[in-house]
Image (cartoon, rainbow, N blue to C red):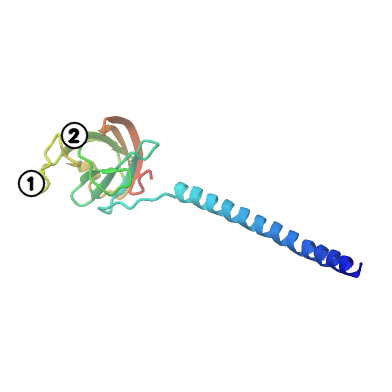
Amino acid sequence: MRSNTLTAIITSVTLFTLVPAVRAQETHNHQHAEQKSEAAHDEHEGHDHTAPHGGALLVLGDEHAAHLELLFEPTTSKLTGYVLDGEAEKAIRIAQQEIRLTVAGGDLKSSAALTLKGIASPLTGEKPGDTSQFEGSEPALKGAKKFNVVIKSITVRGKEYKNVEASYPEGNH
């Protein structure tokens, strides 16, 4: 009888000790799962890319299918556009001969239309109509540090993006 009582006491003590420990572990594991889920969400929400040429990144489409990096030289008023993949790492050649855009606001006294023409590169074999680089200049931009830009239309990998808006040098990323 003594043995049964002792066994019952040990069993009760063990259960009272283990059940809270198991529940604490379950809560701990659940919290880790929530933290991982939140971290993954935050990582996606704060998903940043670095402009490879040091310019401003414009996201094309809600799904980050591609980017257009704009690099501006205020002393010459030259604006260069680079068409990049969704990670803003690799150049994407597009069939357009030119990219038309409007610049306004910021340091500019008036709005201006600007056409970036496709650039040939003997190094990569790119040529207008099959290039990832576009350039143009507009005297109204000379000396500007900030302005707004609207890309009229750009087609990348068969998908057309219209009226893409951004601020320079911030971009829309």
Q: Is residue 147 visible?
A: no
At a point 27% along the width and 45% down the height, the residue shown is 70
| Residue sitting at the far left | 122
Q: Is residue 16 visible?
A: yes
- Relative to the observer, which residue lies in front, 133 or 143? 133
Disc 2 marks which residue?
Answer: 98
At a point 45% along the width and 47% down the height, the residue shown is 44
Mark 2 residue crowding within 10 angstroms, few (<14) / some (14–19) / many (20+): many
- Relative to the observer, which residue lies in front, 18 or 35? 18
Specify the amino acid type for callout 1.
Pro
Query: Taking 14 as reference, is 42 above or below it?
Result: above
Total count of labels: 2
- Locate the C terminus and report the quarter of the image it occupies: top left
Looking at the rendered structure, which numbered label has been put on residue 122?
1
Determine the CA span between mark 2 and mark 1.
19 Å
| Residue sitting at the far right | 1
Looking at the rendered structure, which numbered label has been put on residue 146?
none
Q: Position of residue 142 (x, y in %)?
A: 22, 47
At a point 16% along the width and 37% down the height, the residue shown is 117
Q: Name the mark nearer the viewer: 2 or 1.
A: 1
Q: Secondary structure at mark 1?
A: loop
Q: Position of residue 71 (x, y in %)?
A: 25, 48
Counting residues from the start of the chain, the first of labels 2 and 1 encountered is: 2
Query: Taking 97 as reference, is 17 above or below it?
Result: below
At a point 74% along the width and 59% down the height, the residue shown is 19
- Residue 1 position by quadrant: bottom right
